[in-house]
């Protein structure tokens, strides 16, 4: 069964009193990735991850120790020169999700990326083989 692996993360709100918790929770929630759905299709699982704004080259999909790791990151830079004012902005967007893939045939995993949706087909298997593998995104 596929299960997201949740890591406890420290946020700056821990350093402040409860008065500031809501402010920081709202602020940092904007940096989370899009939603992810996992469907049981009988003979396989279908994992669909929303990654809006990312290009295929920005996405990494790896299989390590019975975990599938989805990473996406990109950096944009804007430079504007007007009169004596120079403005330069940089934006780094990143997202990562990790799922357990126990009971999945690792050699037949397929992935595609279209219109901001990463679709990963994970065929079911009775027995797993060990090892790590990179998965090509089509």
Image (spheres, rainbow, N blue to C red):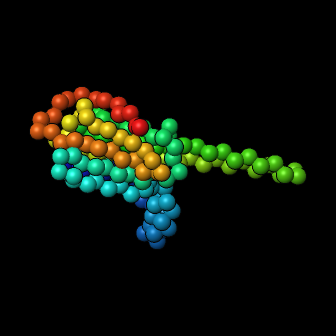
Indicate the position of residue 118 as horizontal and vertical percent values: 40, 47
Q: Residue at x 87, y 50 (%)?
A: 84
Residue 95 seen in render: no
Of residues 112 and 20, which is closer to you in this image?
112
All told, the count of numbered labels is 0
Q: Who's the residue at 25% across and 31% down the image?
A: 107
Q: Residue furthest bottom?
A: 19
- Residues 65 and 51: in front is 51
Percent position of residue 41, x then y: 21, 52
Measuring 17% from the left and 51% from the top, which residue is drawn there? 42
Where is residue 111 drawn, in percent x and y? Answer: 35, 40
Which residue is farthest left?
Answer: 126
Q: Residue 68 vs residue 20: left or right? A: left
Q: Position of residue 136 (x, y in %)?
A: 38, 33
Q: Quadrant of residue 98?
A: top left
- The picture quadrant where one finds residue 68 is top left
Report the residue at 20% width, 29% height from top: 130
Q: Is residue 16 left or right of residue 40?
A: right
Which image quadrant: the C terminus? top left
Depth check: give the residue in front, 98 or 10: 98
> Is residue 21 shown to the viewer in this render?
yes
């Amino acid at each position: 069964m596929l299960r997201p692996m949740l890591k406890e993360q420290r946020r700056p709100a821990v350093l402040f009193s409860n008065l500031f918790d809501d402010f920081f929770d709202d602020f940092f929630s904007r940096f989370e990735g899009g939603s992810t759905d996992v469907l049981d299709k009988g003979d396989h699982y279908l994992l669909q991850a929303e990654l809006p704004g990312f290009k295929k080259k920005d996405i990494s999909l790896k299989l390590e120790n019975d975990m599938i790791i989805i990473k996406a990151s990109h950096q944009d830079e804007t430079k504007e020169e007007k009169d004596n004012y120079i403005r330069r902005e940089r934006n780094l967007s990143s997202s990562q999700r990790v799922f357990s893939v126990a009971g999945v045939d690792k050699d037949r995993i397929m992935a595609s990326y279209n219109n901001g949706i990463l679709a990963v087909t994970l065929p079911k298997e009775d027995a797993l083989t060990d090892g790590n593998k990179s998965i090509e995104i089509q």
